[in-house]
Amino acid sequence: MEAYKVWEQDTGLVEALHPSVEKHDTKNNEREAHEQAIAASAQDPTALLAAWHAYVQYEEKQIGRSNSDTATILQRTPSVHASRERERVRCTFERAVNQCCLYPAIWQSYLTWEVEGGELSRALVVYQRAVRNCPFSAELWVAYALFTEETADFSHAGGDQEEAKVDKVYLDAAGHVGYYSAQTLRQVSLSRCDYLRRRFLRHVPAKNAAIAAPFVEKEREALRQEFDELAAVLSAKEDPGGARAVQLYRAELEALVFRMVPRAVQVWEQALKTCSDDAEAWLSVVDILRAIREVGHARALLKRGANVLQLVSKEQPKGVSAASMVAYMARWVEFERREGDVDTYKVALAKYTSLAHLVPAASAGAVGGGKMRDKSRANKGSGDSEDPAKAARREEVMKKWAERKALEEAGGAAPKGTRVWIYTETHIGIDRHGHGHTGIPAQT
């Protein structure tokens, strides 16, 4: 007690600590406001998530604001002080996920914070907890699989074991999200397709992916089998769109990576049989064929796709909208502009013109700037009506032009040296000497 009285009487020390005490009182008041906001929004999930995010952001800002003076007062080294401040943020996140454990957004924020802080071992544990609490979230499962792949070491002898870990995450993900919806299963499956492509290119360099070596063919067959299995699973879940997306992905690899166009065509043919109402699927195949310079095949596919889509639009108007048909035909016209001759261009333009009237707004840009020309005419017309002086000049020009025409018809001529300025879209004017005008003079 005596020591405290001595310390209390040391006015210099007390005054030096007074600003720090006030600063910490302010922080406590701000934290109390966040606590009250969380308590007030307990029955509103959206407001509750927003309140927790605001609280976490507040605590993250305090790490940067906390300085060495605070560490000295608390008798901590700077590194220990920074670690303690991070623990405060982590504690806030833990409280948030404890109260909102079924909301993927709060888990994703927690995971991002741990990864950016370099706490990978902690992040792995949080990922495992996140997918256990939100097994329905395809986003969390995909992020977990990507994190596992990113932190794996495929370069050493145990690379197969590392790949097995990534495969297990994807298999667990498919097993869980498949119970909830076909859409989430499709998202996980397409992410797995990305991983399978990367795995193939780790085993076989891209420059060797098209060679006929036995070990390369073995890897290609393994990849094809994986893709076929994924497509079969999605088909079994009554998701033909997802199965088609996987097949188109495989066909793209066959054409662009393996350089096996006949195989790619076979897969495309099979996939396009199930997408009679999907214009984008047809166009995506055309784009790839054009990229590998199979222009003739691409043109044949454009024609076939147009016929199929038109047939579907007549039988099922809701399946293929008029806007989709016009957009498809516009892409065909664009294709022929760059790849075709006059005849093929006229065929595409005729198809487009026959449908363009259905969607005027969508069709204006594909016929060479019709909308801009109409707009220009409208502007010029409105300008004439708004400028009486310009209208008067135009009448005078037309009068002079009529006089000149009458003289020519009568066998006469205009006065020598007269310049008659012809009316153009940019200027109207008359000047006997040709001064001060920017129009096109015609010497008579």
Image: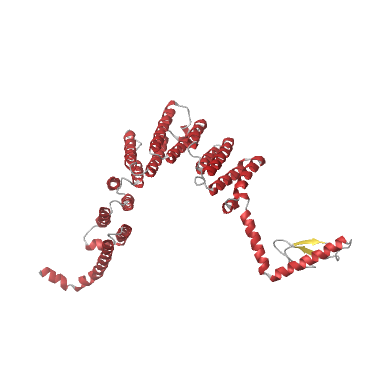
Return the x and y of residue 283 as percentages of the image width and height: 53, 42
Q: What is the image's colouring?
A: secondary structure
Most foreground residue, 273 or 433: 273
Report how many numbered discs are placed on residues in the image: 0
Furthest residue toward right: 411
Return the x and y of residue 114 as percentages of the image width and height: 31, 51
Residue 76 in view? yes
Residue 430 in view? no
Q: Residue at point 66% right, 63% down?
A: 380
Return the x and y of residue 360 as percentages of the image width and height: 59, 53
Q: As displayed, is residue 104 above or below residue 284?
A: below
Q: As displayed, is residue 246 above or below residue 380?
A: above
Return the x and y of residue 198 as percentages of the image width and height: 41, 38
Left or right: 289 with respect to 41? Answer: right
Furthest residue toward left: 1
Left or right: 354 with respect to 9? Answer: right
Left or right: 397 with respect to 318? Answer: right
Which quarter of the figure is the N terminus placed in? bottom left
Q: As displayed, is residue 127 above or below residue 77?
A: above
Quadrant of residue 387 within the rendered picture: bottom right
Furthest residue toward top: 214
Which quarter of the figure is the C terminus placed in? bottom right
